[in-house]
Amino acid sequence: MNISCFCRRYIIILICSILCVATPMTAKGGNAEKWESEYKAYGRNINVSVTISVSDKEIMPFLAINPMQELSTDDMNKFKKIFDDLNQTDDSFTFVNKANRISIGYSDHKSHPDISDADKVTTPAWSLLAYDGDTAYAENNLLTVNEAEDIIQKNIQMIFSSVVFQPRDIIVNDRTKYRKTDKQITDKGYYEINSMQMIDEIPIAASIHQAYRFGQTKRDAVVGNYGSAHSWVTDQKNFEGNYILWNKTAELGIPNQLLSFDVIKPIIEELIMKGNVRNIYHAYLGYAQYDLPEGSKYEYVLAPAWVFWVDWVDTASEEIDRDAQNGNGLYTEWYYYKPIIINAVSGETTDPLNESESRMLLPAPCMKYVEDY
C-alpha cells in the first residue's frame, strides 16, 4: 500500500482572540492541569475538556531561528546509504530533500490501482482525541500509537539525532473500500499524525502564519509548516513522513514573568460566549513563531505563548458544516481548525480576521527581548 496515494483528509480549524491586560505571573513547569467546563452560548452547549500542557522547563527564552537548509550532495549520499542499508529488499523506498523538506518513505508492496481514485473509493477516518499510547486503534492493525510515534522519530533521527517531535493531531484511517460495494481493497488501516518540533524540550505549538482567515499567501503556507512533521504510518515497512525543521540560531532575552493560565483563560471564555469558539482540542504553553520587522538582525523568532487549537466560526449564527462524518470522527471545512495564539509576555492575541501587513510581527512590547542581541 502506498500511503501517499490515499485520499488524505485533515482535521483543520481557525482562531481569533482579544487583547487582555492582566497581572503577569511566573509560569511553573510540570503542570498537567485539566480544564473541564460547560458553557451556554447562543443556545449551544459548549463542553470543554482539555489538558493544559505546560513544559517542565521553567525558563523560556526568546529564540532566534532560521529554516532548515537543504542537505549537501555529500550528506544526501551518506544518509541515502544509511537508509538503503536498512532496506535491502525490493520494497519501494524514497529519500528526498527538496524545498527545505525532508521526505522519507517506503512501501512493502504495490498499491491497488484504484487506491487514488476518489470517485471510486473511500477511506473512512476519525480523529483520535483521547487515547492510550500502548493501544492499537487502526483497523486490522496491531501497531500501537506509541509504536507509530517511534517510527516517526527514528527516521528523522537517522539524519538529525537531536531532533524530537511531539504528536498533536492523530487521525485513524480505516481500510480503503469501494464506495458502491463496500469491498475493502487494503489489508490494514493506518495513522495520519501531525507533530510539533520540540526545541529545548518545548513544543513549537503554532506559527503566526497559521492564525488568520483571509489574506493568506503561499509564503504563509510555507512558513506556517516549519517546525512540523506530517506522517502516514501503517507499520515499519509502510511509512511516509514529511519533516520541515527550524534551526535555533541564538538564545535571546529571558522574560521574568509569563501570564498564567488563570489570567488568559477569560480571553478564551469570552470567545466561547461570543459564539466564535465551538470546540477546544489542544492547549499549550509553548513556543509560537513570529516574524521580526524588516532590518532586524534576525528574521524569525520563537516567543513564549499560550496556544489553543480550536473550532472557530466567524459569527455566532453560523453553524459548523461538517463535510464528512465517519464513525466517531469529524472533518470540517479548512478554515475551522486554527490556533488562537496569546503572547505569554504581552497578552496580545491574534485576531483571525486581521488582514493588516503587520499581523505576523512579534508584538512591540516583546521587542526589548530581541533588539539587544
Image (tube, grey):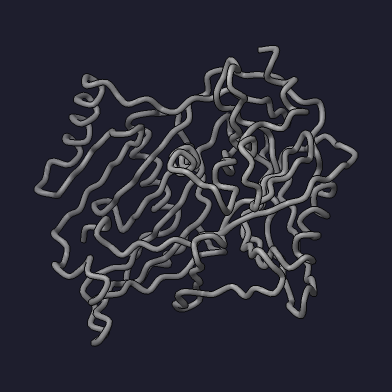
Q: Is 79 situated left or right of 31 in this image? A: left
Q: Is 147 situated left or right of 213 in this image? A: left
Q: Nearer the viewer, residue 158 or 363?
A: 363
In the displayed structure, would residue 24 be above or below residue 124? above
Give the residue drawn at x 44%, y 33%: 245
Q: Nearer the viewer, residue 149 or 114?
A: 114
Q: Position of residue 247 (x, y in %)?
A: 48, 25
State the quadrant of the N terminus: bottom left
In the displayed structure, would residue 369 be above or below residue 129? above
Quadrant hosting residue 222: top left
Q: Nearer the viewer, residue 301 or 358?
A: 358
Residue that lies at the very extreme toward the right in this rendered image: 23
In the displayed structure, would residue 93 be above or below residue 368? below
Give the residue drawn at x 54%, y 48%: 215
Residue that lies at the very extreme toward the left in this rendered image: 90
Total labels: the figure holds 0
